[in-house]
Image (spheres, coloured by chain):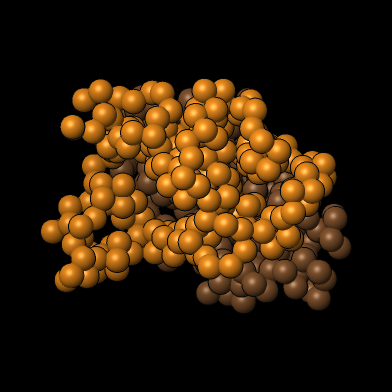
Amino acid sequence: MSNVNIIEELAGVRLGSPLAQTLLARVDIMKLSQASYDAIIRPREPGGLSHAERSALAARMARQNADETLAEHYMGKLQEACADPKLNEPILPGEVANYGKRLNAIVRHMDLLTREPKEATRADITALKDAGISEPDIVRLSELAAFVNYQVRVIAGLKMLKGMLG
Amino acid sequence: MKTVHEFTTELPRWSPYITPVKLSEATPEQLDAMKVTPSNKSVSDYVLVLAHDPESLAQRSPLFNAIMYGNDGLSRAERELGAVGASVVNRCVYCAAVHASRYNQLTKQTDVVERIFQNGANAKLEKHEQAIFDFAVKLSQTPPAITADDIVNLRAIGLSELEIVDLVLSTAIFGWANRLMHTLGEPVKAAS
């Protein structure tokens, strides 16, 4: 596990600031959030979902949540992961048809989980299975979407608090 | 099996769309992530489904517990209200049932949950509960829709900075939990 804490870094929490002081009381939660990031964005066992694909999808989900700083962070991780050249650009809405059957299905599902999770049904899982995605990979994808949407909201909340506390 | 579509405090059963890991075939890493020990072999289908990705499960479970059941800071009931706000936006009927029930147990009242289940994200509540619920609902939108005014409202009902951090966390962790529970399976009427 690394010592950096990406959530605090990207929320712009300055060392020694009032919010940084407050967060000292939640250092366990910040550490577990970072450990979750490591386990989901760059896992030891990525299964059928490479580190590059994870970062590309995370960047797309961050952008859909209007968090450009987080999106840029993941684009940086994508470049580090020496991506498939096709994934070197963020996967933008409307370009879904260009990625082949497997990735189309994945992108469609990530969009659903990010924007309208309430609309998800059994048919959406069936569609992933039909695109040849294994059950363990469906769970990995779900954790990825779920985690990024958690991270976006912690950062959004801390940024807003920082604006008031300094 | 009858799928439960409406919000309820009557606890449904969770029925997975993904084949749960078989406990007898689980790897040591999966057993460890599921916290299976010789004295604790009861594992829910939900955890058995998540065990397909043991690396993330091993971190998420302690994170969830630290956020929801930590000692100081925001009250247990108010954390549950954050969880309910997220679960209403994401329409996770199972999560809403579990956490609305806990809220009712902790507060020994049912009025707040009844209003939320009736009117969803637009529910009208007393000032204190309204500020907390509205914050959770707005933070749960995509993109998150909280404004400085929402923080002002939380300060106005007496929440400290740390308590607001706890509300952010308890709402956000349901942005995570809802996206698993509601999308990898469905709530079905429990056998009576």
Q: Which chain is orange?
A: B
Where A111 sits versus B180, above or below? above
Report x, y in % for residue B148. 82, 45
Quadrant where the N terminus of chain B sits is top left
Q: Residue B135: horizontal and vertical position, in percent?
A: 68, 41
Location of residue A97 with respect to A2 vertically, above or below:
above
Asked whether B119 or B67 is in front, the reply is B119
**Chain coloured brown:** A
| Residue A154 falls left or right of residue B20 | right
* Residue B2, image quadrant: top left
Residue at image location 65% in from the left, 48% down from the top:
A153
Count the marks: 0
Considering every residue shown, the one lying at the far front of the view is: B108
Of residues A115 and A17, the one nearer the viewer is A17
- Which quadrant is home to the C terminus of chain B? top left
Residue A56 appears in view: no
Of B151 and A86, nearer the camera is: B151
Residue A76 location, x and y as percent?
68, 57
A104 or A60: nearer the viewer: A60
Image-quadrant location for residue B60:
bottom left
B9 up-or-down from B21: above or below:
above
x and y percentages locating residue B52 in the rendered image: 31, 53
